């Protein structure tokens, strides 16, 4: 995915999220460096951004001065004085997805605490979007809570869901209620994988609610940390009745990549 | 550039609670009201002082109110209950009678609760769901007659036709003045912002109505001197946004602040705490029937269900306002548990999509915990509109 | 994991001796046919109803010797077939409100169904489902509704989704807009933006109108329009006489329910279990698609209850010293099986009991009479009056505790939960609590609700 940088101008995107901070550097039309670190609350969002940017620079064998333009995105973008411009992660995800897969028309972006439905036109412009309402039930948080209940790693939830032969319908109106429901179901002898599949479906139903607002058009692109979850991909395909493009890149980097592409657009005009 | 009259209005609002308390000491009676279809003309003509109650944005009052109503009711209703529970708000304290109409039925429950728990003297005005059918209109007329009789008993005098005609003239004047102000705020490089007009509308909830009209007319005079007649174009690339949806009462500034911070320009609203109450009120005769017919036939509130999409007056009005103010997008504000607006969000979006107008729903409450989340959504929407403007300009 | 329950063969001969069921259209079903259905066809087609492994809602009563209970179960399970048959014959099927009266609908030749029955019917359109599958199907229909409207809608949105998705053929949506329900008006409205564009009409419910002439006029006019709309679909004209005749039948049902309830309440030991007793207002208010049939079953129910009280028979599954629970709130109730196991018994519920308690005058203008009756439903009165009436029922039923239960999404009921509980507690001295549930339309009760109900019962014990 990376290439040794030369003397062409370089542009960077920094995506400061609540859980992780990502940076991507593009130059001469390709990705030359990237960095991904957990967002350090003690260090602060500004320093987290700079740290992940530094990692990307190391990979690209560049220095900070080589960067012609920087765009910051994510919740932490408001404290990114090193950035030339800030843009929301919706617009950035749109650009990033379009770059990686130009026939993307719909994006499902699922992070730890929010979820976005984004519609693009053929040029990667955002034409519509919807985000989850104040409620954990449609976010990755639900999965984290459940991984804890089942005492498994978050990454194991997806494969477990695929093993299920049956779905136990789960409450989709409250993560906390679903948690206590889970414990009673386990006590009653329900198979863990069936419950886990039910949880994936409950989340998928909440996401489908957002999509009823913006519509689904092929190709559908899955991004964000939860995109690595094969069980979630399967549940979404079933509930949305759509085929989801398998990610061939790290879905967590899409926002930062889009920011870098926008940095190139704005930076080239300067 | 701050307009002089706006300062005067602000001052007048500051002094109003004291003014009210004194008026009451001298025997005046105050009728506080909330919801959407209480005709102030009648209250005013009977020599009573109308005050529109209800403020928002205070999560502490919401919490207090939720102990009596419930956490599953909209924050606006919870805050109203909280206001009565605490009884510190000067307008609540100075209301001798609280009138509530039944447009929004959650608010009707509030009336029951404040009567039971806080011994508030309440008066209910029924509103028909079938407001567009002759039998519904007949019902509303009779309801208003009964309501008026009770007000007469409270006031200690009968409704006089001439006084009513005068009050109607006054309120027609206020409504016209507000509509004119809305035109001014939507022009390019306006001397008055939407937000200032919105605050001026709220001032009208409290101030003495005669004084209010003369202040509005003074304000319009200032604007006319500076600008001439208002002409609404769309020349300077703003992201022009119309604000619609659940009520945004005085003191609920979270969403408005955020839209401004992210570079959106609000050029009008379709709110019942803003422009809507001033629209389409045609009182044909100075009588209770004249008022009943006018109120039941104006722009319908979303809380009154309407079964046919093509002829829906609320949507027609929304589409018209978008045209009038040359808005490029609608931010549709819904309060959690406000069914009338929330359930119609998808439909409203579909309808506006057919007109090529994007809509963003912001579903929220009064707590501040979603400020960043709203900021992201509003900012992305502004980006979308500005990008769309650029693309359309290059075509 | 499932455990199929079946009616013991030894009861068959005695069951056959009881009355057959006669229907409104003149047809009838014999007790042997009912027995065959409940022991052979039913378990094949609707296995979930016969699953006794879990405390699920809709589970058949274990009190197999209570024959009226078996007949009520039969009416519920055969509803799907009867509705499809009626629809084929051109009988208009109409979605209405839960707990409202039904006289004008049946009089005009239609079959009115509350949202719960429409959801149930939609679920039963797919046969052979076990408990898990039935629950899952119900949830899928529910989620379809939530996606298009909002997650904040009460679960009755499932009924609207079932209609919109074409799962069940409903010809008209025309409820009374009783004050009980915050969602109905907007859910009916939402059909205007749907592909099905089902005909719809709202019978408004003016508030605080028990004594206001103009409210009665308003409602009477709307009821006339309602019957005309149904007649337009059925092609059958509705005369004043038709309405009076229907009112007589339904008054009979209401009266029987009241009489048998008084008898049930008077008994030292509950003569039936909660499932069977809870079903009585559903017979006398909702009529499970056929007033003639259910009035017949009510007659049988009254006889059986009387006999049991006479011989001090206790309902199967009822604890030795059960705590008596009265339920009020929105159109939900606690899971009767669970309540029984926790040591309590359900002695009443206000939702449809309010309609059952209100007879309609027969002589005179039938629309005016209907309007006056509807406007005097105790459940719909201003909350202080509603609470007083409920307190009276709590006393009559000798309840030990009151649960105000409301469904997720129900703004109007939750808004008065505390006020109702406070007033009733003050007037009766009985412990009260309020609980939110998410049950409506679900088969398996959710743990959180069961937990709270159980804790309350323990407190009473």
Image: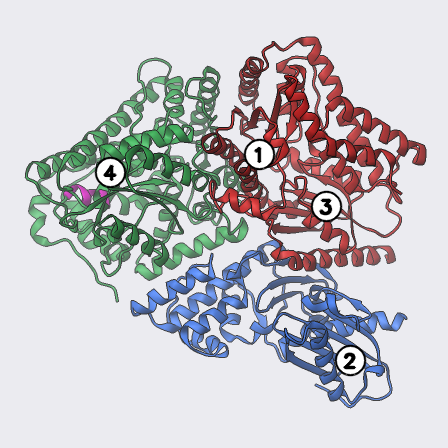
Chain colours: A blue, B red, C green
Is residue C71 shown in magenta?
Answer: yes
Specify the label residue B306 is tagged with. 1
Instruction: Please tell me whether residue B8 is drawn above or below residue A153 in the rendered image.
Output: above
Look at the image and give the residue range highlighted in magenta: C67-73
**Rounded to the nearest whole Å, what is the CA distance between mark 3 and mark 1?**
21 Å
Q: Which residue is mark 4?
A: C280
Q: Nearer the viewer, mark 1 or mark 4?
A: 4
Residue C300 locus on image (x, y percent): 15, 35
Within 10 Å of disc 1 (Cα), the crowding (few <14, some 14-19, many 20+) is many
- The answer to whether mark 1 and mark 2 are in CB contact below 8 A is no
Which residue shows up at 69% across the image and 46% down it? Answer: B253
Given residues B300 and A139, the one toward you in this image is A139
Q: Chain of mark 4?
A: C
The reply to whether label 3 and label 1 mark residues of one chain is yes
Of badges 2 and 3, the one in the foreground is 2
Disc 2 and disc 3 on one polypeptide chain: no
User: Which class describes the residues within 10 Å of circle 2: few (<14), some (14-19), or many (20+)?
Assistant: many
Give the x, y percent position of residue B173.
78, 23
Residues C218 and A47: in front is A47
Which residue is under mark 3?
B355
Distance from the alpha carbon under mark 1 to that under mark 4: 36 Å
3 or 4: mark nearer the eye: 4
Q: Kindly identify which residue carries mark 2.
A: A26
Q: CA distance from mark 1 to mark 2?
A: 54 Å
Examine the residues drawn in magenta and state their main secondary structure: helix
Mark nearest the camera among 1 and 2 is: 2
Q: Earlier in the sequence, mark 3 or mark 1?
A: 1
Q: Answer with left or right where residue A99 lies relative to residue B338.
A: right
- Name the chain under label 1: B
């Amino acid at each position: 995915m990376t290439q040794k940088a030369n003397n062409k101008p370089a542009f960077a995107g920094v995506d400061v999220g609540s859980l992780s901070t990502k940076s991507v550097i593009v130059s001469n039309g390709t990705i030359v460096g990237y960095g991904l670190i957990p967002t350090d609350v003690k260090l602060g969002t500004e320093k987290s951004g700079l740290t992940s940017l530094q990692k990307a620079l190391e990979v690209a064998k560049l220095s900070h001065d080589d960067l012609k333009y920087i765009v910051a995105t994510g919740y932490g973008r408001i404290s990114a004085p090193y950035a030339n411009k800030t843009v929301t992660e919706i617009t950035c995800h749109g650009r990033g997805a379009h770059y990686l897969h130009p026939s993307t028309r719909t994006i499902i972006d699922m992070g730890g605490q929010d979820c976005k439905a984004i519609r693009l036109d053929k040029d990667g412009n955002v034409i519509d979007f919807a985000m989850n309402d104040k409620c954990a039930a449609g976010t990755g948080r639900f999965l984290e809570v459940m991984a804890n209940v089942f005492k498994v790693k978050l990454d194991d939830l997806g494969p477990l869901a695929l093993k299920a032969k049956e779905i136990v319908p789960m409450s989709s109106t409250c993560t906390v209620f679903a948690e206590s429901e889970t414990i009673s179901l386990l006590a009653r002898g329900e198979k863990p994988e069936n419950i886990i599949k039910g949880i994936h479906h409950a989340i998928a139903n909440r996401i489908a609610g957002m999509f009823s607002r913006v519509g689904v058009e092929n190709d559908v692109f899955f991004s964000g940390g939860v995109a690595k979850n094969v069980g979630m991909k399967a549940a979404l395909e079933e509930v949305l009745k759509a085929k989801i493009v398998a990610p061939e890149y790290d879905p967590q980097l899409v926002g930062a990549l889009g920011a870098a592409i926008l940095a190139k657009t704005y930076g080239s005009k300067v | 550039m701050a307009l002089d009259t706006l300062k005067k209005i602000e001052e007048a609002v500051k002094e109003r609670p004291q003014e009210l308390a004194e008026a009451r000491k001298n025997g005046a009676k105050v009728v506080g009201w909330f919801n959407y279809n209480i005709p102030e003309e009648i209250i005013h003509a009977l020599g009573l002082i109308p005050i529109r109650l209800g403020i928002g944005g205070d999560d502490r009052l919401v919490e207090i109110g939720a102990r009596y109503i419930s956490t599953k009711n909209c924050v606006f209703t919870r805050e109203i209950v909280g206001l009565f529970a605490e009884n510190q708000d000067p307008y609540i304290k100075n209301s001798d009678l609280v009138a509530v109409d039944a447009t929004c039925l959650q608010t009707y429950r509030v009336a029951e609760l404040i009567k039971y728990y806080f011994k508030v003297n309440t008066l209910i005005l029924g509103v028909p769901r079938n407001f567009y059918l002759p039998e519904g209109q007949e019902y509303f007329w009779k309801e208003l007659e009964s309501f008026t009789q009770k007000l007469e008993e409270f006031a200690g005098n009968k409704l006089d036709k001439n006084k009513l005609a005068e009050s109607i003239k006054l309120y027609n004047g206020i409504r016209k003045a507000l509509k004119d102000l809305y035109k001014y705020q939507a022009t390019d490089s306006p001397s008055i912002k939407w937000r200032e007009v919105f605050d001026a509308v709220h001032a009208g909830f409290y101030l003495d109505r005669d004084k209010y009209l003369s202040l509005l007319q003074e304000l319009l005079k200032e604007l006319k001197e500076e600008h001439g007649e208002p002409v609404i174009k769309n020349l300077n690339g703003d992201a022009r946004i119309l604000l619609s949806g659940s009520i945004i009462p005085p003191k609920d500034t979270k969403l408005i602040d955020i839209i401004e911070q992210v570079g959106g320009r609000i050029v009008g609203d379709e709110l019942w705490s803003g422009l809507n109450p001033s629209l389409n009120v045609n009182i044909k005769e100075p009588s209770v029937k004249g008022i009943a017919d006018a109120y039941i036939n104006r722009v319908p509130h979303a809380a009154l269900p309407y079964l046919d999409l093509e002829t829906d007056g609320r949507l027609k009005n929304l589409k018209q306002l978008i045209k009038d103010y040359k808005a490029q997008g609608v931010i549709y504000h819904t309060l959690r548990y406000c069914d009338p607006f929330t359930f119609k969000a998808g439909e409203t979006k579909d309808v506006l999509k057919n007109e090529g107008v994007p809509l963003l729903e912001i579903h929220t409450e009064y707590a501040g915990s979603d400020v960043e989340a709203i900021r992201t959504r509003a900012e992305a929407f502004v980006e979308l509109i500005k990008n769309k403007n650029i693309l359309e300009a290059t075509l | 994991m499932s455990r199929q329950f079946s009616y013991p063969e030894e009861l068959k001969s005695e069951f056959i001796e009881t009355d057959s069921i006669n229907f409104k259209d003149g047809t009838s079903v014999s007790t042997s046919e009912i027995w065959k259905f409940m022991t052979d066809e039913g378990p094949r087609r609707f296995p979930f109803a016969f699953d006794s492994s879990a405390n699920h809602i809709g589970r058949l009563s274990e009190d197999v010797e209570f024959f009226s209970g078996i007949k009520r179960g039969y009416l519920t399970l055969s509803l799907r077939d009867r509705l499809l048959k009626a629809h084929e014959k051109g009988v208009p099927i109409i979605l209405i409100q839960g707990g409202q009266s039904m006289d004008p609908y049946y009089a005009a030749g239609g079959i009115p169904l509350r949202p719960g029955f429409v959801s149930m019917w939609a679920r039963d359109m797919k046969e052979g489902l076990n408990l898990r599958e039935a629950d899952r199907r119900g949830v899928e229909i529910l989620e379809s509704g939530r996606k298009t409207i909002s997650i904040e809608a009460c679960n009755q949105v499932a009924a609207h989704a079932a209609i919109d998705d074409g799962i069940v053929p409903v010809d008209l949506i025309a409820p009374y807009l009783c004050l009980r329900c915050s969602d109905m008006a907007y859910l009916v409205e939402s059909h205007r933006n749907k592909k099905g564009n089902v005909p719809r009409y709202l019978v408004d419910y003016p508030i605080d109108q028990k004594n206001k002439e103009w409210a009665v006029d308003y409602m009477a006019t709307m009821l006339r329009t309602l019957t005309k709309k149904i007649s337009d679909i059925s092609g059958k004209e509705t005369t004043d006489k038709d309405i009076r005749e229907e009112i007589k039948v339904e008054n009979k049902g209401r009266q029987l329910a009241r009489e048998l309830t008084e008898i049930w309440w008077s008994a030292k030991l509950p003569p039936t279990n909660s499932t069977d007793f809870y079903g009585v207002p559903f017979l006398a208010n909702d009529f499970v698609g056929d007033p003639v049939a259910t009035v017949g079953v009510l007659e049988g129910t009254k006889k059986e209850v009387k006999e049991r009280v006479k011989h001090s028979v206790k309902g199967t599954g009822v604890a030795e010293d059960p705590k008596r629970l009265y339920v009020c709130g929105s159109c939900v109730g606690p899971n009767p099986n669970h309540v029984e196991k926790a040591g309590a018994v359900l002695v009443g519920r206000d939702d449809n009991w309010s309609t059952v308690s209100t007879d309609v005058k027969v002589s005179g203008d039938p629309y005016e009479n209907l309007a006056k009756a509807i406007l005097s439903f105790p459940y719909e009165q201003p909350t202080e009056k509603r609470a007083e009436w409920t307190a009276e029922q709590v006393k009559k039923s000798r309840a030990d505790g009151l649960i105000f239960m409301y469904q997720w999404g129900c703004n109007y009921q939750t808004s008065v939960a505390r006020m109702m509980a406070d007033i009733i507690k003050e007037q009766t001295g009985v412990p009260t609590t309020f609980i939110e549930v998410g049950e409506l339309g679900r088969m398996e009760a959710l743990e959180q609700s069961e937990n709270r109900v159980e804790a309350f019962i323990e407190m009473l014990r």
